[in-house]
Amino acid sequence: MESTPPILHQPARPADPTGSRGVLYRYWFGVSLWKRILAAMVLGAVVGLLWGEGVASIRWIGDLFVRLIRMLVAPLVFVIIAAGVAALGDTRRLGSIGAKTVAMYVLTTAIAVCIGLTVATLLQPGAGANLAGAAPQAVGTPKPPGEIFMGIVPTNPIAALAAGDTLAIIFFAVLVGVGVMVAGEKGRAVGEVLASGSEVMLRIVGIILETAPFGVFALVAVVMGTQGPETFINVFKLGVCVVIGSAIQTLITHGAVVRGLAWLPLLPFYRGVADAIMVGFSTSSSSATLPVAIKVAEENLGIKPSISSTVLPLGATIGMDGTAMYVAMLTMFSAQAFGVDLSLADYGLVAITTTLVAMGVAPVPSGSLFVLAAVLNVIGVTPEQTALVVGFILPFDRPLDMIRTVPNVTSDLSIATAVARWEGEIDVEAYKSSKDI
């Protein structure tokens, strides 16, 4: 695919802007997006603390930004995956990429669970926790595996697109891409339309991302103004566990994937994915970050669309390292709070169950809390006790969710980098020369 200047950092602008307005224009677009978002986070935190509860009046700005991003997810996933599969040109390559991708997601998720269990066992965040004042919260009953797998095949693809059913969209998009491949010359016109559509969608992503600093400012300000920094104090030990676990998974585990499995230097990777990390942190949603992740993968990391368009949408659905780590930590928190003694076999059951459950969590804020019952049931925690835990954590979950979304994002991008390297679908020179800093 012919390379074009990325909208994200080189937007269309007047040929010779002059005056104070021109200086401001050049300064704004001359600063990398992730730096603008970081500045917006800091400013939002300060404004939220100073403004207090009144900051809720600007919540609509953050909500509007999230809606703009979410608006793109379903059509982007369909067009990008269908175009990417069609571009592979060989169904055998699709099977190879799919097998490697799923295996890598299972591996990193299992590692995240082990990290979560280890950190929570060592720091004991639930020891002495008083849940008596917590208001019980209803928790959903997890779908049985058979129903989940059956739901992958949509009865109505248009309805799946309208509902944003990511797994069903992925399934249908893969079939469309395979159909284009099998059709050969007769399917070329459809393949060209899909390729053109994916370019258009990525340009739209670039346009919307220019509003990110304003949306992030509002999101962070509302969290700090309505909940305040005491949100971390009230669950301080659990917060420390989440920070430590997320740092280990993001820097060590995912760093090992890039350095040890993709044989690439680490600095260009973390420099290139900064935009996606910032958006993931502020929105607390892997699915909302997907459009940004695809853009930085192709423009900053040099990953070809045939990989980014297949690996990343799948990762936004099943690549939940941060979620898996957090559910494991909450399981230990609950066991410690209720005095449940766990054997080595119990740890093994928790690890297996959490790995499976995490891959089915909806990629939305606080989605992990509502599958907790499936894991706690394994160690004998009752539904009533689970409701107490969720009621205790839920009021303070947003800042913790922001932190644990970061390893979700870096998991997707590190695995996409490794798979692209194995398949020869990455421009290594473009990866190493990333100037996004």
Image (spheres, helix red, strand yellow):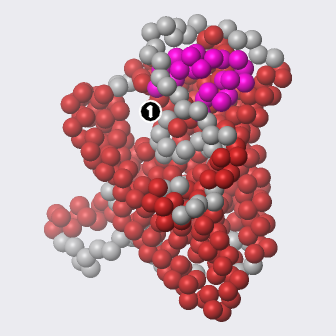
- Name which residue lies at 76% across and 35% down: 352
Residue 353 location (% of width, % of height): 73, 34
Q: Main secondary structure of the magenta part?
A: helix
Element under disc 1: helix
Assess whether residue 385 is covered by the magenta stretch. yes
Residue at the spot of label 1:
398
Question: Is residue 398 depicted above or below 346 in this figure?
Answer: below
Residue 375 seen in render? yes
- The answer to whether 150 appears left or right of 68 in the picture is right
Question: Is residue 25 depicted above or below 180 in this figure?
Answer: above
Residue situated in front as seen by the camera: 327 or 231: 327
Residue 420 location (% of width, % of height): 70, 66
- The answer to whether 23 appears left or right of 390 in the picture is left
Residue situated in front as seen by the camera: 11 or 140: 140
Residue 39 location (% of width, % of height): 36, 45
Assess whether residue 134 is covered by the magenta stretch. no
For badge 1, the amino acid type reads Arg
Question: Is residue 205 depicted above or below 252 in this figure?
Answer: below
Q: Please provide the residue range marked out in magenta.
A: 371-394
- Name which residue lies at 34% across and 41% down: 219
Q: Residue furthest left?
A: 19
Question: Is residue 373 depicted above or below 384 in this figure?
Answer: below
Q: Residue furthest front?
A: 155
- The answer to whether 201 appears left or right of 183 in the picture is left
Would you identify the image quadrant in which residue 99 lies?
bottom right
